[in-house]
Image: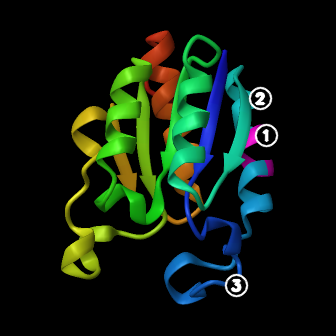
Amino acid sequence: MNILVLNGPNLNLLGTREPAIYGTTTLADIEAACAAHAARLGLAVTCAQSNHEGALIDHLHAARGAMAGVVLNAGAYTHTSVALRDAITATELPVVELHLSNTHARESFRHVSLIAPVCLGVIQGFGARGYGLALEALHGHLTGAPLPT
């Protein structure tokens, strides 16, 4: 099973961008960890990142019929993009919304997610570890696998 790991605006700057909030792990580190974790789960990942809303939508559209699910860190578009929400709905894929930081512990404008209602679930506040949690959640959803013991 193939999973799309899709990252939105400014996530290409991970490792140097506000490390007190986002940590020092780079996007390349996260993508490598996702590939390794996915392989242990019997999954394959395709990773993509864009600072452009339309490009993220294009990646979601391309995933339709090609991917089993999506891990999506939409960054700031989480709180502003009806178009991204509509694209998630249109794909009919299970999508796990992901955030490195706990958005509810931050500015009030980050407390509302426009995409959460059309996602399978939301993982946030666990830093780069959240990607592994999201992959496990998707794997369990797609395969019906029991919780790890």
Looking at the image, residue 6 sits to the left or right of residue 21; the answer is right
Q: Position of residue 85 (x, y in %)?
A: 33, 40
Q: Check contact, mark 1 vs mark 2: CB within 8 A.
A: yes
Q: Which mark is residue 36?
A: 1
Q: Which mark is residue 16?
A: 3
Establish if 74 lies above or below 143: below
Which of these two is toward me, 10 or 19? 10
How crowded pointer 2 is (Cα within 10 Å; few <14, some 14-19, many 20+) is rated as few
What element does badge 1 sit on?
helix
Q: Earlier in the sequence, mark 2 or mark 3?
A: 3
Identify the magenta region. 32-36
Looking at the image, residue 135 sits to the left or right of residue 112; the answer is right
What element does badge 2 sit on?
helix
Q: Position of residue 68 (x, y in %)?
A: 56, 17
Q: Position of residue 82 (x, y in %)?
A: 29, 46
Q: Position of residue 105 (x, y in %)?
A: 26, 77
Which of these two is toward me, 82 or 8? 82
Task: Select label 1 or label 3 by which is in front.
Answer: 3
Q: Which residue is mark 2?
A: 39
Question: Alpha-carbon distance for marks 2 and 3?
Answer: 28 Å
Q: Is residue 66 magenta?
A: no
What element does badge 3 sit on?
loop
Q: Is residue 33 magenta?
A: yes
How crowded pointer 1 is (Cα within 10 Å; few <14, some 14-19, many 20+) is rated as some
